[in-house]
Amino acid sequence: MVDDADAQRTKRNNKQTEKPVEGRQFSSKAGEIVHEALELVNEEQHSAALAVMAKALALPDLNPYEKATIYQMQGGSYYAIDQYPAAIQAFENAIATGGLLPKESSSLRVSIAQLLIGDGQYVRGAQMMEDWNRNGGQLKPAHIEMLWQAWSHAERYNRALPWAERWFNTANPKERKHFDLLNFMYNHLQMPAK
């Protein structure tokens, strides 16, 4: 029996939403090297771990999952040694491999946005976080706070205001800092009536 067109479309869309699980394992050679890197990471020897990860990435015939996992590990190690630009690049490389499930890519995107903001790339980070939210990412209170702060640091107060108001509205209990922030925003944007 053949599925009707709607059933075929549904199956195809489900396959596109959740990438196939095949290939989501390590070859023995790559697995050994990654295990060595993991041991170094667990011992907080991130520079040594990064050298081992570079060796793993140089292996021929790595599948996308292997590459994505190694890049994520790289990003974590770069982050641990405060090399934010390298961490951002490694996480972006992990997404670009195509070896991650949509939920994993989404999680990395918000991490990249936070790193960008932490690295002083306020506009790029805030835009990325807003895009992530528009594409289904769920903002936590810390994300909302980070958004108004990023736009404020970029001196884009008109972009910061909606996030500051949302931060204020969800605060419970409201503290002086919440009122002070809105007063600052309204004064800065010449909205004295507010």
Image: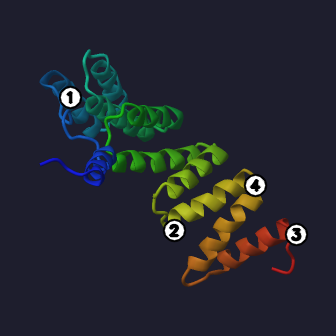
Left or right placement of residue 190 versus residue 58 in this view: right
Q: Which mark is residue 156?
A: 4
SS under mark 2 = helix
Q: Which mark is residue 141?
A: 2
SS under mark 4 = loop
Is 12 drawn above or below residue 54 in the view shown?
Answer: below
| Mark 4 or mark 3, earlier in chain | 4
Q: Amino acid at mark 1?
A: Glu
Quadrant in the picture for residue 100: top left
| Mark 1 or mark 2, earlier in chain | 1
Mark 2–mark 4 Cα distance, whole angstroms, equals 20 Å
Residue, disc 3: 190
User: Which mark is in front, 1 or 2?
Assistant: 2
Percent of width and height locating residue 101: 31, 44
| Mark 2 or mark 4, earlier in chain | 2
| Mark 1 or mark 3, earlier in chain | 1
Q: Amino acid at mark 3?
A: Gln
Percent of width and height locating residue 107: 40, 50
Is 93 drawn above or below residue 137 in the view shown?
Answer: above
Mark 2–mark 3 Cα distance, whole angstroms, equals 27 Å
Q: Which mark is residue 36?
A: 1
Q: Amino acid at mark 2?
A: Pro
SS under mark 3 = loop
